[in-house]
Amino acid sequence: MGRSSKSKKVPAAETGSLDAFESLAIAFAALAAEAGAAEFCVFTAGPSLSQGRLTPAIDSEFPKVSRASKRLAAKATAALADRLRGSTRPFRWRRDRRSAEPELHLVDDVDPIGLEGHGFALPLHTASGRNGLVVFIGETIELDDAILLDLQLRAIELFSSLLRAAAPMPKKVRAMSNRELDCLRLTADGKTSEEIAELLNLSAHTANQYLTAAAQKLNAVNRAHAVSKALRLGLIN
């Protein structure tokens, strides 16, 4: 393959600072590059996994939330919930079957999300019981079993660091309005600013203002980080 699977040191991500998240974004991007993927998206999964809901955590366009992350979050299904609940095996998909796929023993050829193009996903299960998923997308992905196993182990380590980075909470959360919480809740459901505005009868500008205010009150680096903190604080579910 010509790619090194040498493990890189996991960035220190204990402070919840923007630098910590930038370091993690760079580290995940390095994993994507090793696999030949053009994009990556990391998600946290709801504690119950009952609805397969995915919350964007970090992706290739950090500190923004990429279109791919929003699209995948909106596609979360019961089939995905069953997959994350019952298996740690990676899965891959390819819409264009004209080119042969290498035979792999550690990956399933299934698509519980209904994705387009070519990619693979690694379920992330941490020792603390938290669950997530990292998705790699691209037309030039090359894998073998050894690379796949190494990528998954390193992704779990990075995901654990990501959870620690998101964990620090403000000692006192400033009071949040119902509209701010509504916007966070809909963001957690994968809605875009435009979709939130339509659902709440607001302008997209106003919806973005509510999300910005909520992120500031939660001391979050972006709206995905704000959603993660709000979920952990029990402000939304």
Image: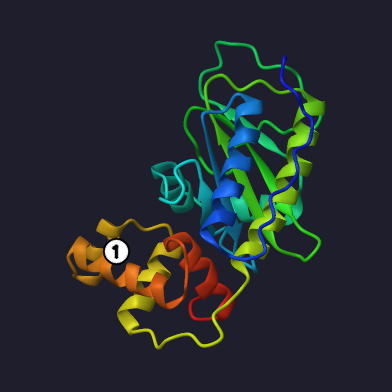
In the structure shown, which secondary structural element does the residue marked by tag 1 occupy? Answer: helix
Circle count: 1
| Residue appearing at x 67%, y 64% in the figure | 14
The residue shown at (66%, 27%) is: 34
Vertical order, 226 against 151 (above or below)? below
Query: How far across and down, in percent of the image, does residue 32 sit?
Result: 61, 33
Q: Amino acid at mark 1?
A: Ile
Few, some or many residues within 10 Å of mark 1 (<14, 14–19, 20+): many
Quadrant for the N terminus in the image? top right
Give the camera-side residue of 191 and 77: 191
**Which colour assignment does the render follow?**
rainbow
Residue 220, percent across and down? 47, 68
Residue 212 locus on image (x, y percent): 33, 68
Q: Is residue 53 left or right of residue 49?
A: left
Left or right position of 119 against 107:
left
Q: Which residue occupies 73% across, 47% down?
A: 10
Q: Position of residue 150 (x, y in %)?
A: 79, 35
| Residue at mark 1 | 196
Residue at the front extreme, as displayed: 19
Image quadrant in which you'd find residue 183: bottom left
Q: Residue at x 59, y 30 (%)?
A: 93
